[in-house]
Image (cartoon, rainbow, N blue to C red):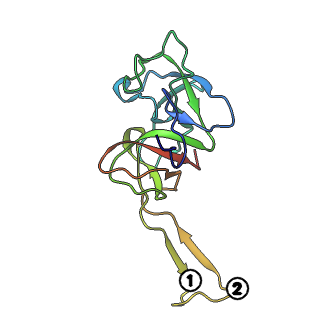
Amino acid sequence: MSPQIGFKEAVNDVVQAFSRAPEQLQIGANATAVKMLPGVAVIFDVNDHDVKECGAAGAAIGVLGYAEANPNFKPATQLTAYAVGDSVPVYNGPGRVYAYITETIVKGEPLVLAADGKFSKAAAITIVASGAANITDGQAVTGTYGADGPVVARSAESRTGAGRAWITLIGV
């Protein structure tokens, strides 16, 4: 048997390499329960301790975990959603997540938040030199995010089509 090349995937979890423990929050009343899957990006709901799925270009506070879930609320599998009112582990900061992707990605591509707490490829970023065709030393440069918001992750592996893939969070 040959050694695994690249990072070693977490076993029976959707997160890896986070430097801090998850925050225990609760699935809020406004969450769409079927969308509250381990690996989905979330935002605060009405109360500070409640979360719901993040929308496209939203400001996610973290992603739902699995292995550290309270045993009383832990879904049967990583593919089973949490219910409204369940206590859930929410991870934030740099780390890897087995997240939901909306399209084909290539390892290293920048990712942004998409609908339903999923991630998609970032649109091109525009950089403009102050009215000049070429940027010179010391010249002012302005830039904007792509139309879909700031980059929050990079793909840690390639995947064909929508589904689940390992990503590295950088901005959640």
Q: Residue at x 45, y 50 (%)?
A: 157
Classed neighbour count for the residue bearing mark 2: other residues with Cα under 10 Å, few (<14), some (14–19), many (≥20): few
Label 1, on which residue?
A: 129
Position of 63 relative to 75 (above/below): below
Up/down of 132 relative to 111, above or below:
below
Task: Name the residue carrying label 2.
Answer: 138
Query: What whole-number distance in Å separates the C-alpha atoms at marks 2 and 1?
Result: 11 Å
**Mark 1: secondary structure:** strand
Q: Is residue 75 visible?
A: yes
What residue lies at 40% left-to-right and 52% top-to-bottom?
A: 158
- Residue type highlighted by circle 1: Ala
Which of the 4 image quarters holds residue 94?
top right
Q: Where residue 67 sits in the image (x, y, percent)?
A: 53, 23
| Residue 169 percent coordinates (x, y) | 56, 46
For residue 46, say whether it is visible: no
Residue 56 position within the rendered picture, expressed as x and y whole percent measured from the top left? 41, 47
Q: Nearer the viewer, residue 106 or 33?
A: 106
Could you tell me which residue is drawn at 53 percent across and 51 percent down?
Answer: 152
**Nearest to N terminus: mark 2 or mark 1:** 1
Disc 2 element: loop
Spot the residue most to the front. Answer: 1
Task: Please state the horizontal and vertical placement of residue 171, each as a whole percent of the image.
Answer: 58, 49
Q: Residue 100 appears in which quarter of the rendering?
A: top left
